[in-house]
Image (cartoon, rainbow, N blue to C red):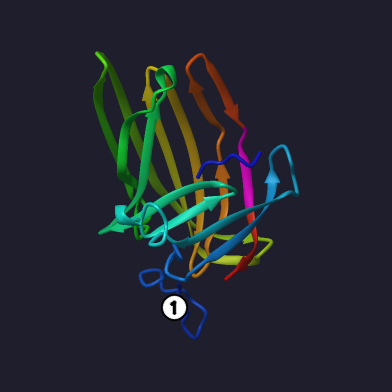
Amino acid sequence: MRRLFPALMAILLSCGIVDRDQADYLMWDKGRTTWAFLVSEGTFPDDTFHLVSDTATDTAFGSESADVYLDWEGRREYFRLAGDRVEKLTDFSVYPGGQVIPLQYGFTLFMRYPPVLGNTWNDTSRGSLVYQGDTFSYYHAVSGSVDSILTLSVPFRENVENVYLIRIDEHLFSDLSESRVHRVYYLGPDIGIIKAKVGPDTFRFADSSWIEERLVLELFEIQR
């Protein structure tokens, strides 16, 4: 249940209206931050789930120019900002005969930032590697969209305005392994992720395949 895949300052005017053009929906420059979520849908309802964000400069991937990492209960992802791109470090390998064959290692597009209603993005990459006479090929596709702006209530706060709903789908494929992951993020100004829908995700490794159920997470606490 804790294997998940799947991130988010606002200037409040005196009247209480958020200036979306100046708001920070990532909250990556606030130092170590923990978002605590309540599982509202999934196998373990009412369980808690923690997302931790911190600088990546002191990690093994600091030399790769990662800005932050997001740790989803032990599943760590590395990100950087590059212009209007939020990029994620992709590390896609296969393991024929116990050997590690890295097919793709580097930053790839995850989402466009800042969010703009109606924006969409698609990014694909493919390649191959010859190892001991065998050719290993891969395909990687990411697509996303900013679907709406809404007011949302979660245990952390009621009636959060100017929340962006963002969808992201990712597909990694090789002959030996494959994954399809689906994410819906609700990003609140000066909060970050206030709600997330994770999955259902499908995975294949050699002759085995499995599905990870959909989880719905709702924010109830932020620790800095």
Q: Amino acid at mark 1?
A: Ile
Circle 1 SS class: loop
At 55% from the left and 37% from the top, the residue drawn is 199
Q: Relative to residue 152, is residue 87 drawn left or right?
A: left
Magenta region, main secondary structure: strand
**Could you tell me if residue 121 is visible in this image?**
yes
At 52% from the left and 79% from the top, the residue drawn is 16
Return the residue nearer the eye: 28 or 111.
28
Return the residue nearer the eye: 44 or 57.
57
Residue span colored magenta: 213-217
Number of residue marks: 1
Q: Position of residue 103 (x, y in %)?
A: 31, 30
Q: Position of residue 209 (x, y in %)?
A: 54, 20
Q: Relative to residue 180, is residue 90 drawn left or right?
A: left
Q: Residue furthest bottom?
A: 14
Q: Relative to residue 134, is residue 30 drawn left or right?
A: right
Q: Position of residue 120 (x, y in %)?
A: 33, 45
Vertical placement of 48 versus 23: above or below? above
* Image quarter (top left, top right, bottom left or bottom right) of the N terminus: top right
Q: Quadrant of residue 2?
A: top right
